[in-house]
Image (cartoon, helix red, strand yellow):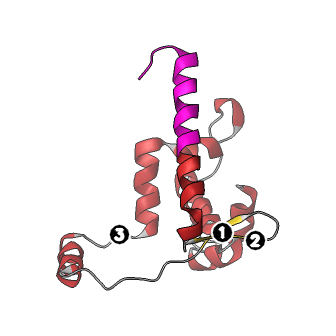
Amino acid sequence: MPEEGMTFATGLKAQRTQAAAQFDNGFPDNAEVTIDPNGKPFLKQTLRKSQPEGLASFEAEVHSRMGERHLLDILKNGTCWTSYTRHFRPPFGANPKLSNAEQRYILTVYSYGCNLGPGPTARLTSDIATAEALRRMC
């Protein structure tokens, strides 16, 4: 790879031009791409081929080795690794005045991430947060 920016960009442009020329030359024989009257290309959905031999035994082996994971556990572990809930806290480093703040932040992410909304989530977790509390955390 060239070390100078201009020669690197020129090389990439040449590769892109060559790839476009190859595509253009092979287009009449290409059954997977169509172009509509407006000139917009579309990829056709390819038909599924038969299953590879041994796929069922492979899937069974993967499922037997892989433990069951729950989404709330994944969000909780993600909080430990990345501390993403720090973005939910009040500005200027003030301590949140909420009880179980971390749990409520995780529930808010779960609620909106699963497209449930605060109402159904609060009904499922009435001992942790109300719907109004979850609504305000967004």
Disc 3 vs disc 2: which is toward the camera? 2
Q: Position of residue 71 (x, y in %)?
A: 45, 67
Residue 37 is left or right of residue 58, and the answer is: right
Disc 1 vs disc 3: which is toward the camera? 1
Residue identifier under label 2: 36
The 10 Å Cα crowd at callout 2, few under 14, some 14 to 19, many 20 or more, is few
First in sequence, mark 1 or 3: give its number.
Answer: 1
Queried whether the magenta region covers residue 11, the answer comes back as yes
Residues in magenta, as a range = 1-18
Residue identifier under label 3: 69
Residue identifier under label 1: 42
Q: Are marks 2 and 1 in contact (CB under 8 Å)?
A: yes
Residue situated in front as seen by the camera: 58 or 79: 58
Would you place residue 113 above or below residue 18 in this image?
A: below
Queried whether the magenta region covers residue 101, the answer comes back as no
Q: Residue at x 29, y 83 (%)?
A: 51
